[in-house]
Every structure is written in C-alpha cells, then in structure tokens.
Amino acid sequence: MDWSLAPHSLEFDGDGTLLSMYVVTYSKALPYSIFFVIAWGAYDVLLRLAGFGDQIRAVRRGTWALKLMNLTHHGLITPLALLSMWQDPVIRQLYACFGCNEAAALMNRAAAAPLAARALTPVTIGYFTADLLLLSQWQLTQSSKVERYLMLVHHVASMAVWPAAVYFDWVARYVLIMLSYESTSLLLTLLWIISAAGYKQCLLRNKKFGRVTCRGRPAGEMPKKAQHSLALHGLQAVRDRKQEAA
C-alpha cells in the first residue's frame, strides 16, 4: 500500500523540542478529530431519523452513536495496521526471528522511515481526542468506574507518547503493533452492542425446535400489537385442531 496517499503530509519536520513535536503531530490529528465528532453527530441523527428516542433499551442514544463511531475507527485502523505490519520488512523480521538483536535494533530505528506509522498514528490520536471530547456520552455507571479510569489513562498516555515515536522516529514501528491491538477494541465494542441490544444470551441453535432462540429478553419486549396477533394465531390453531378432531 502506498502510504503517501494519506490525507495528511507524512513529513514531521520541526525543531527538536517537545512543543514542536506536539504542534506538528496534533496539527495533523486535528482534521481526524473533527471527522470523528461529525461521524458521531451523523450517527446520532440517523438513529433519531430511524425512530429511536432519547434512549434505546435504557441507554442514551448518544452513547449508541458513540459506539458506532468507535466501530468506524476500529474497523478502519485494524486492517490497515495489520497490513502495514505485513508490508514492513523490519516487523516481519522481528516476528520471524524472536530474540534476535538485529531485529530489536531495527525496531528502535531503521534506515527506512516507518511511513505507515506516520500515516496511521495521527488518525488514532485524532480519534482519542474526539472520544475524550465526547466523554459525556460514555456509559458512565458505577460498575464501569474502573474501566472508565483505565480507558482515560490509555487515551492520555497514548496521546502523550505516540507523537514522540513518530516525530523523532524512535520505536515508531511498535506503535503499529499497538494499533493492531485495536482489533480487541473492535470485538469489545461489538460485544457491548450485542449485550445492550439484549442478545448476549442468544442461543445459536435449539436442538428441540431446530431454530434460533434468545433468552434474557425483558418482559414486554415484543410490541403489544405483535403479541395480540400471535395470540389470535394461537387461538385459531386450537380451533382448527378441534375441528379436525371432530
């Protein structure tokens, strides 16, 4: 893949100060922050147009929109990070030769600049920034208090350290490996959506009836009109059987 096609410049020029490092890196990340905030707003509008109210299954609509924004980032970055690892000869050498000093030294800094890291890191830093700006839309419950703090530390630490890796070209390839771990975030977000939608305890197969069934849905989940229709259908089936028996 030609990483020079990235929307932002892959040149991280400037003096060797921390201020210049953050100014250059975050100027590239800013458009992505705006993009993800707009994506969240668009998802929120689409959910409202789809007929959903302020809450969807006791969860705010804005939180659902945030999870869809999360999926957008994870679904974009995960395959690109994995592709970049496959294309980078230094990373391939690292996994092909565990414990080799040469591979370890090249992972710190190689002759060829890690263009993929320069292309993808601003995208995820921009996403982290947007996610923090939308902190009010997180599902903040007492049970998720520890998880919330861990996620905050994860975001802030990455936003503080990753710019140094790409700006000074030091261990930048390790950032690509970390970006590939967004695959776990992709799965966790999907699990959250499945759970919040009430399908966490779905059975994929029911041996008795030979069909998909779900457990754990709250009472009254089915609309009253559908319940009434099923009741009438059941009564009609009973009448038909009585007529056949007669």
Image: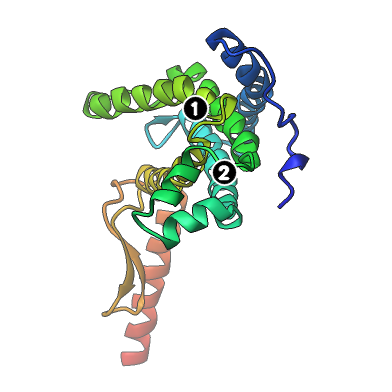
- Judging depth in this view, the residue of 154 and 133 nearest the camera is 154
| Disc assigned to residue 22 | none
Q: Residue at the location (44% across, 54% down)?
A: 94
The Cα–Cα distance between marks 2 and 1, rounded to whole angstroms, is: 15 Å
Q: Mark 2: which amino acid? A: Ile
x, y percent for residue 3: 71, 44
Q: Is residue 229 above or below residue 107?
A: below
x, y percent for residue 213: 34, 66
Q: Residues within 10 Å of mark 1 (few under 14, many from 20)?
A: many
Quadrant into which the C terminus falls? bottom left
Q: Residue at the location (56% across, 57% down)?
A: 86
Q: Mark 1: which amino acid? A: Trp
Q: Residues within 10 Å of mark 2 (few under 14, many from 20)?
A: many
Q: Which residue is mark 1?
A: 162
Q: Is residue 211 above or below residue 231?
A: below
x, y percent for residue 98: 36, 57
- Judging depth in this view, the residue of 137 and 9 nearest the camera is 9
- Judging depth in this view, the residue of 155 and 213 nearest the camera is 155
- Judging depth in this view, the residue of 29 and 221 nearest the camera is 29
Q: Is residue 168 above or below residue 102?
A: above
- Work out which residue is located at the far front of the displayed protein and give it: 102
- Closest to the camera, between mark 2 and mark 1, is 1
Q: Secondary structure under badge 2?
A: helix
Question: Along the horizontal axis of the image, is 113 left or right of 94?
Answer: right
Q: Residue at the location (31% across, 91% down)?
A: 245
x, y percent for residue 162: 49, 27
Which numbered disc flags the more N-terminal residue, 2 or 1? 2
Q: Which residue is mark 2?
A: 77
